[in-house]
Amino acid sequence: MKKYDVVSKKAEKNVMTVVVKAEVITDNLDKDITAARDLIKRAGRPSIMVLVNEQTLQTSDKGAPSAVTTSDTLATVLSQTFKSDGWDIKDPAFANGKVHVAAGATLGAAEAKEIGDISKAAFILYGSVTMRNHEGMAGTDGKPVTFPVTGEYDLTLFATDVGTQIGKFSGKLQLGKVGDKEGEVMGKMLVSYERTAYDIIMRRRDDILGPLRSSVLEHFRNRQVNGAEVSLAVSGLENFTAAKDFKRSIENLKGIKEAEQKDFSKGKAMFRVTYLGTPAQLAEAMEAVTFKKKKLDVTGVTTNSVDVNVTK
């Protein structure tokens, strides 16, 4: 849904009927940049960290790679695109070297949560890219191409707040076989291997970002409809009965679809809440209400949790 207006509301026999006028996008939502950016904005400008292990191999037609270097071409292109879509980009360098994903590495829920805690990123895009600088590759006229490059990528997108894999994305990075239209383009890459790699990635950008963006937007749309799990920690409760009363009170809070009490110890209760909104929005809702005429103070908010204290 791109936008909507409420036309009318009517309550009858405990049933609320709402009529809306909506502009709905049914196909290729990932290609509608306006809709994408609007959805990202409504999601609270989520944060993402791009962790891509990119290696460049110097190869020849006669032997194994002669040198291996590291680069960050794809990570740069991905970060720039996410930023233009409205994401909050988290720099891995801010984690003081604690965050690193080796080539071929995988992340589970525990690893994703740990990275999220370190980086404060709600999403992690990680994986590997291998670029190959070919020496002596023949061009369309039989002469060597100056700076020919090929490669492949394998990426995974993780939501750290719920430890869920959003999707996996892989493909080839090349301009085409020698002799075809793209091969002619490859033959014109006369600046450097680095420039050729950048041009290849830019030409393949839509192929990479299309499925990735589509999966992200579907994830956000699903959260808008079905809600997202938020860990709610509540301190200052007198006893277990007060914890049960608190659960019943928040079940009536707008946006909360479900609340489940997990633990209670020393005046502190843990709840798992399914909420139609972001943790920051839940925090604002908490501070706008009271519990047994006592004010609620929000003492902490993360990408998947809210800490609340019941004042005395």
Image (cartoon, rainbow, N blue to C red):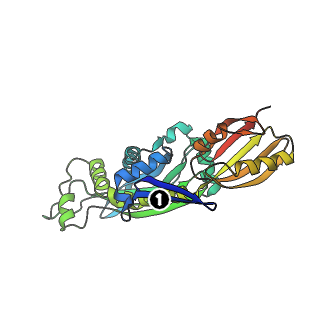
Which residue appears farthest toward the front when viewing the image? 12
Front-most of 93 and 5?
5
Front-most of 17 and 200?
17
Q: Residue 221, relative to residue 46: is it above or below?
A: below
- Where's residue 56, x and y in %? 38, 53
Apparent side of residue 170 relative to residue 206 in the rendered image (left or right): right
Q: How many marks?
A: 1
Residue at 47% across, 55% down: 8
- Where's residue 124, x and y in %? 52, 51
Q: Which residue is mark 1?
A: 19
Which residue appears farthest toward the top when viewing the image? 312
Apparent side of residue 142 relative to residue 37 in the rendered image (left or right): left
- Where's residue 245, x and y in %? 80, 48
Residue at 49% across, 53% down: 125
Which residue appears farthest toward the left when viewing the image? 141
Q: Quadrant of residue 279?
A: top right
Q: Secondary structure at mark 1?
A: strand
Q: In which quadrant will I find the C terminus?
A: top right
Residue at 24% across, 60% down: 136
The amino acid type of the residue labelled 1 equals Val
